[in-house]
Each structure stands twice: as C-alpha cells, then as structure tokens.
C-alpha cells in the first residue's frame, strides 16, 4: 500500500481547483455570449418596432393634416374664410383635450 503524503493531497486539491476554475470560466464565457446574442436580438427587434412606430406616427400626422385641411375647406363653405381656421382649430383642440382626458382617466385606473 502506498502512502499518500500531504503534498500529494495538496497537489491533487490544487489540480481540482484549477479544473473547476477553468470550467467556471468557460461556462461564464458561454453564458455571457448567449446573453450578448439575446441582447443583440432584442435590440434589433425593438429597433424595428421603433421604426414601425415612427412610420405609423408619420402616416397619422399626414392623415390628420389632410383631415384638418378638409375640415377647413368644409367650414369655409359655410362660414367666412377668416373664421374657418379658428373653428377647425377649436374642434381639433376639443378632440385633443378629450383624448388627453381619456388618457389621464385610464392612467388613474391603472395606478390606483
């Protein structure tokens, strides 16, 4: 039977620690690689989402411009051309206040 000395035990323990540290380092690198890839995919998807939202807002602003112009032309038929922009602006302001009130009401329902 061979004798195991303290130095043999320490060497075996240090070899085990070395192997464990390499395994931990490799798993940490793999974890960070997967996290980096997931973040890249999420940013890519959110970038496209922001782009589509910007396109939708631009389309809605264009549509609102045409609706406002049509509303102005319709009001100008029945009122003077001087009063038509003010009436159209008043109607748009009332609708904006209505939307703001609805948004605040929905926010207060969510918050409490």
Image (cartoon, rainbow, N blue to C red):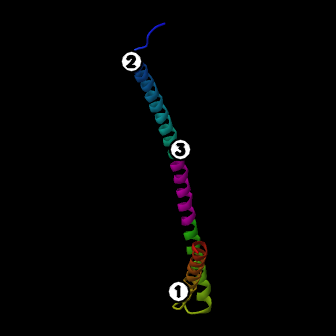
Q: Quadrant of the C terminus?
A: bottom right
Q: In the picture, residue 41 is in which quadrant?
A: top right
Mark sitting on residue 38: 3
**Left or right for 33, reference 66:** left
Residue at horizontal 42 percent and vertical 21 percent from the top: 15
Q: In the picture, residue 72 is in which quadrant?
A: bottom right
Mark sitting on residue 85: 1
Q: Which residues are magenta?
A: 41-58
- From this view, report whether residue 77 is shown above or below residue 52: below
Number of marks present in the image shown: 3
Mark sitting on residue 6: 2
Callout 1 secondary element: helix
Q: Residue furthest top?
A: 1
Q: CA distance from mark 2 to mark 1?
A: 96 Å
The crowding category of the residue bearing disc 1, from other C-alpha atoms within 10 Å (few below 14, some 14 to 19, many at least 20), is some
Ranked by sequence position, the earlier of labels 2 and 1 is 2
**Left or right for 41, reference 22:** right
In front: 17, or 50? 17
Residue 82, horizontal then vertical, whole percent: 51, 91
- From this view, report whether residue 102 is shown above or below residue 60: below
Mark sitting on residue 1: none
Callout 3 secondary element: helix
Ranked by sequence position, the earlier of labels 2 and 3 is 2
Q: Do labels 2 and 3 touch, CB within 8 Å?
A: no
Residue at horizontal 51 percent and vertical 50 percent from the top: 43
Callout 2 secondary element: helix
Ranked by sequence position, the earlier of labels 3 and 1 is 3
Residue at horizontal 53 percent and vertical 44 percent from the top: 38
């Amino acid at each position: 039977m061979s004798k195991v000395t303290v130095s043999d035990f320490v060497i075996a323990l240090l070899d085990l620690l070395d192997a464990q540290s390499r395994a931990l380092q490799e798993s940490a690198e793999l974890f960070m690689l997967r996290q980096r890839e997931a973040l890249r995919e999420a940013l890519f998807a959110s970038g496209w989402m922001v782009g589509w939202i910007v396109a939708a807002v631009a389309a809605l602003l264009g549509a609102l411009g045409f609706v406002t112009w049509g509303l102005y032309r319709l009001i100008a038929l029945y009122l003077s051309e001087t009063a038509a922009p003010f009436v159209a602006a008043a109607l748009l302001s009332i609708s904006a206040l209505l939307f703001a009130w609805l948004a605040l009401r929905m926010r207060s329902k969510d918050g409490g």
